[in-house]
């Protein structure tokens, strides 16, 4: 890129009005004194392909991709990382100098990095992980826990067929637990994750029995509105190490910012504050 060019990045999806990414990247651009911009772009399915192909010529160095394009973008990309292919979706695009599109998925990185920072003693390889939920976010969680060495992944979902499909895709480490008995999978787990949208503002509460939670377990919730969900409160009351979901959102943004703007940003209180203020 020429020295005078102002690098542009952004988030593309529909809807994007609720996205916290512009506030976060805007904060990092300001902190590092970078003459760049990060822009939310509301683009529906019809125009997506056309827009993506035009952006590199307009000075864009990359993008975050959100609903409903995260899966579809894999077909348009010229290069797809192994982890994006395994997860089946991409959230971060890097435009190469020749206009080629490189697609990656950093959600799993964000998930494990958040736990490593928030619970420094976390040893995922020492015992089973229990995951509630088998939606898009759970795919990234499963892939990253397998990569982190978890010996067994217990998975439970209201719609059991979705969990069964993941067992087929991710292999023998994944075992599916009936949703009615989901609370049982916590026993002797090292890592416990709520990857459903239950407990989020406007959604019903998480109701599976959590009596199996014990001190020492590392427990996280992907939901971060509110920051302390009922699920995390139960874990805190049981003496578990609790890590909220906002850190995952912050950490998944780091690799993209670094590739686009050439500086690795810090996930610190100021970055959290930038998101919490909006
Ligand atoms: P998704 O693909 O729509 O999946 C939603 C999940 O929640 C499914 O497992 C679904 O079960 C379950 N669910 C929804 N309503 C339920 C109910 N009433 N009872 C039981 N289960 C229910 O969504 P996603 O992309 O995986 O996201 C899941 C959550 O993670 C969302 O709250 C999202 O905001 C959050 N998230 C956070 C981060 C972060 O950085 N912290 C990143 C990604 C996602 P069924 O399959 O039975 O419908």
Image (cartoon, rainbow, N blue to C red):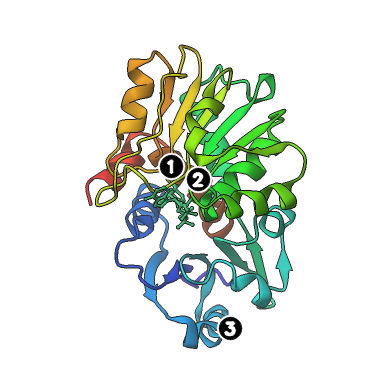
Comparing labels 3 and 2, the label whose residue is closer to the camera? 2
Q: Is residue 25 above or below residue 49?
A: above
Pointer 2: what residue? Answer: 133
Which residue is depicted at the point 34% across and 51% down?
27
Locate residue 227: give its quadrant. top left
Spot the residue most to the left. Answer: 277
- Res. 97 visible in picture: no
- Cβ of mark 3 under 8 A from ligand 1: no
**Quadrant where the N terminus is found in the figure:** bottom right
Pointer 1: what residue? Answer: 222
Pointer 3: what residue? Answer: 53
Spot the residue most to the right. Answer: 172
Distance from disc 1 to disc 2, alpha carbons, whole Å, reads 10 Å
Instruction: Tell me, for residue 99, which label it has, or none.
Output: none
Q: Nearer the viewer, residue 43 or 239?
A: 239
Locate residue 270: give its quadrant. top left
- Res. 13 visible in picture: yes
Relative image position of residue 17 (x, y in whole percent): 30, 67
**Quick one: SS at disc 3?**
helix
Q: Nearer the viewer, residue 185 or 4?
A: 185
Q: Are marks 1 and 2 in contact (CB under 8 Å)?
A: yes
Distance from disc 3 to disc 2, alpha carbons, whole Å, reads 34 Å
């Amino acid at each position: 890129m020429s020295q005078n060019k102002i690098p542009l990045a952004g988030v593309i999806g529909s809807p994007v009005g609720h996205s916290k990414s512009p506030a976060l990247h805007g904060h990092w651009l300001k902190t590092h004194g970078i003459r760049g911009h990060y822009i939310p772009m509301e683009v529906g399915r019809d125009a997506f392909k056309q827009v993506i192909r035009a952006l590199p010529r307009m000075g864009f160095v990359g993008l975050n991709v959100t609903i409903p394009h995260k899966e579809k973008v894999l077909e348009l990309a010229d290069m797809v990382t192994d982890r994006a292919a395994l997860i089946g979706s991409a959230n971060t695009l890097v435009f190469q100098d020749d206009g080629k599109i490189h697609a990656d998925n950093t959600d799993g990185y964000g998930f494990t990095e958040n736990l490593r920072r928030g619970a420094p003693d976390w040893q995922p390889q020492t015992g089973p992980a229990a995951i509630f939920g088998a939606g898009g976010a759970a795919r990234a969680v499963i892939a990253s826990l397998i990569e982190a060495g978890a010996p067994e992944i217990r998975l439970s979902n209201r719609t059991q067929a979705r969990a069964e499909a993941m067992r087929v895709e991710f292999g023998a480490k994944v075992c599916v637990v009936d949703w009615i008995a989901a609370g049982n999978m916590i026993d002797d787990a090292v890592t416990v994750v709520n990857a459903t949208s239950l407990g989020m503002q406007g959604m019903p509460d998480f109701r599976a029995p959590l009596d199996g939670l014990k001190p020492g377990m590392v427990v996280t919730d992907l939901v971060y509105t509110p920051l302390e969900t009922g699920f995390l409160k139960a874990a805190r009351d049981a003496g578990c190490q609790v890590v909220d979901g906002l850190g995952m959102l912050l950490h998944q943004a780091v690799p993209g910012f670094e590739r686009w703007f050439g500086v690795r940003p810090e996930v610190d209180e100021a970055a959290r504050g930038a998101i919490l203020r909006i």
